Amino acid sequence: MWLLAVLLVGCASQQQRAEEKARMQRAVTEAVAERRWHVDITSMNAMRYGSKMVTPDFFLELRGDTLRSYLPYLGQVHRAPMITPEQGLNFEAPLINYRESRPKAHLWLMEMDVKTKEDLYRYRIEMYDTGNTYIHVQSQNRDAISFDGHFAEQ
């Protein structure tokens, strides 16, 4: 009798995991289609300094045609801006270019360009149906940097 109860609990939790996976996949797909998503950052990977864990308050967010970037930065600046530089990659700016594709059944690829008063940035975002997200940022005036994060449902 107890063996039957253990098997039923195991089946129920397996079903719950499958339902959670399907729910996350729908949420990611809808957010990408609507261009309304938020990614909480968990770590950064600096070209010269390796991988570092970050505090939970960093994020990247797309709201229609506007990118909100609140990301740490660790790297070398190649050309100093004419104005006082911001700490990190902290700005809200309209998109110049936006491209989105689905190269694999479980992966969304988004590339976007934004121009701030300091620099021109290209963000390349790989967002998986599981919610795991990889972000690569290239700049004209700074070393490239990447981030790992997770899609946050709104």
Image (cartoon, grey):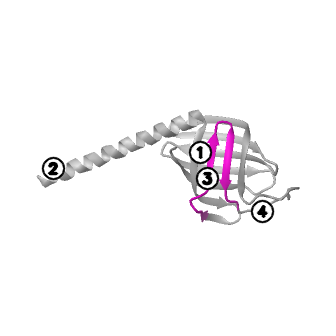
Residue 108: x percent and y percent? Answer: 57, 39
Write down the region rendered in magenta. Answer: 52-73
Looking at the image, which residue is at 61% across and 35% down?
Answer: 101
Q: Please, is residue 49 above or below residue 130 in the view?
A: below
Looking at the image, which residue is at 41% across and 43% down?
Answer: 21
Q: Are marks 3 and 2 in contact (CB under 8 Å)?
A: no
Question: Toward the viewer: 140 or 67?
Answer: 67
Which of discs 3 and 2 lies nearer the camera? The answer is 3
Report if residue 104 is visible in the image: no
Q: Which mark is residue 76?
A: 4
| Residue 89, picture quadrant | bottom right
Alpha carbon distance from label 1 to label 4:
24 Å
Q: Residues within 10 Å of mark 4 (few under 14, many from 20)?
A: few
For label 3, the residue is: 59
Looking at the image, which residue is at 31% across and 43% down?
Answer: 15
Alpha carbon distance from label 1 to label 2:
42 Å
Which residue type does callout 3 highlight? Phe
Which of discs 3 and 1 lies nearer the camera? The answer is 3
For label 2, the residue is: 4
For label 1, the residue is: 126
Q: Please, is residue 103 above or below residue 58 in the view?
A: above
Q: Secondary structure at mark 1?
A: strand
Residue 134: x percent and y percent? Answer: 59, 50
Disc nearer the start of the sequence (1/4): 4
Which residue type does callout 2 highlight? Leu
